[in-house]
Image (cartoon, rainbow, N blue to C red):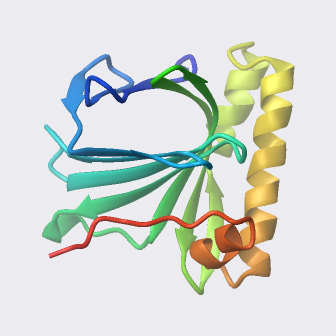
Amino acid sequence: MHPPKIHIFDVPAHVHIDTKGNRRAVDEYRETAFGLYMSRAVVDRPTAHWIESWLLPDLGLCVTDWWWNPDHVRNQDFYLDVCDIVREGDRWTVTDHYLDLVVRVGSDSVVLDVDEFIAAVSLGLLEPAAAERAMQRAYRAVDGLAAHGHDLHRWLGGLDITLSWKPRG
């Protein structure tokens, strides 16, 4: 079992420091009143070639849209990490809290990695207060998505959050 994974988003340096400490060049950062957008190429991963993420601190979610390579397309529209997001100046730090959601627009939303979450809590890797926040955030997301037909944009739009994405093609 691993401790919580940490990402750093360094806006002025145009860098994303991934969970393994690799510095990845960022194509675009965009800050809004509700969060931070990041878009960059995926390096050294045969399954995907691009990643876009929105950090939403008030919801404790990192929303990601992966651009899969042709032989690795997954049955998902969005991947949500449940996390703590802390902004210090122009650097944003994301601490993953193990729980993830896969959203299939108009179909369903599924919570993943509950086994990792339980193991992390039982081993003391995730403090009780952080575990409680993670559960509340995951349930709030599932409830909101279900109430809006599992449409991420409809749910977030009701919270005055409008996500925009890089055009594909």
Residue 20, percent across and down? 33, 20
Q: Is residue 117 left or right of residue 13?
A: right
Q: How many marks?
A: 0
Q: Is residue 91 left or right of residue 126?
A: left
Q: Quadrant of the C terminus?
A: bottom left
Residue at point 30% right, 52% down? 51
- Image quadrant where residue 21 sits: top left
In the rendered image, the vertical position of residue 21 relative to residue 27, given as above or below: above
Give the camera-side residue of 31 and 76.
31
In the rendered image, the vertical position of residue 107 relative to residue 54, given as above or below: below
Residue at point 29% right, 65% down? 166
Residue at point 66% right, 67% down? 156
Residue 125, percent across and down? 68, 15
Give the camera-side residue of 9 and 107.
9
- Image quadrant where residue 22 sits: top left
Residue 119, percent across and down? 69, 27
Q: Quadrant of the N terminus?
A: top right
Residue 6, percent across and down? 49, 22
Residue at point 43% right, 66% down? 164
Q: Is residue 64 left or right of residue 104?
A: left
